[in-house]
Amino acid sequence: MAIARESLSLTDPPLAGIAEVEIDSLAALFDARVRLSPQGAACRWFDAEARDWRSLDWSGLDARVEAFARGLAVLALEPGARVAIQLDNGPDWVAAEQAIHRLGLVAVGIYVQDTAGSAAHILEDSGASLVFLREASAWEALRAQAPLPALRQAVIQRGPDAGERSITLATFLAAGVDYRRPVADREALASLVYTSGTTG
């Protein structure tokens, strides 16, 4: 994801801060940031298909996070369950990760250009229940590496699904259900990061 230099201003007045006492989790921090300036620019990215820059304010990004959280709620995962993300940098990565935190789950980031073997190792080692992938070919490559029995679903961001245990992102979002946020635990694990040293 490229960053537009003109979107970064050093002359805007600083926003009022977020009091640390109101923050008990990463999900709460995100919520507080949304409340701080709901119409303020949250992210900006280049849309290769439209050949144009797109932007999303904090309110819009929060709505995207909520849609992802509702989609994840369908699986009724227990707090602490692992959910992996192998997407390009952009609003869907942020929405997926924040939705994971919102439900008390653990985010497992996978570098988008990692090999199928390395990604399969991370999914297997972490015990991920779901993975967000850029395209169906990534899911096909993962399945060729390992059976991944713990993985219940692959969500495909672009194009059609890849059959077995996979659905498109549009279908995932459309199937969303209401959920109840778990009680925040300040000591709970938020994310797993696999470095090159752990994956070889």
Image: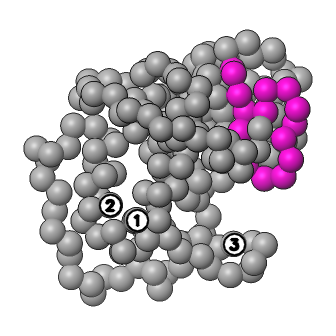
- As measured in the structure, the alpha-carbon distance from the residue carrying label 1 to the one carrying label 3 is 20 Å
Q: Considering only order in the chain, which callout, 2 or 3, is on the residue closer to the N terminus?
A: 2
Q: Between 121 and 96, which is closer to the camera in this rendering?
A: 96
Q: Nearer the viewer, mark 3 or mark 2?
A: 2
Observer able to see residue 86 = no
Tell me if label 2 and label 1 are in contact, CB under 8 Å: yes
What residue is at 67 percent from the left and 14 percent from the top? 150
Tell me if label 1 and label 3 are in contact, CB under 8 Å: no
Q: In the drawing, does residue 67 fall left or right of residue 7?
A: right
Q: Is residue 92 above or below residue 163?
A: below
What residue is at 58 percent from the left and 41 percent from the top? 176
Classify the position of the N terminus by image quarter.
Answer: bottom right
Instruction: Kindly state the secondary structure of the residue where label 3 is placed.
Output: strand
At label 2, the amino acid type is Val
Q: Which mark is residue 97?
A: none
Q: Which mark is residue 59?
A: 1
Observer able to see residue 179 = yes
Q: Which residues are magenta?
A: 151-166
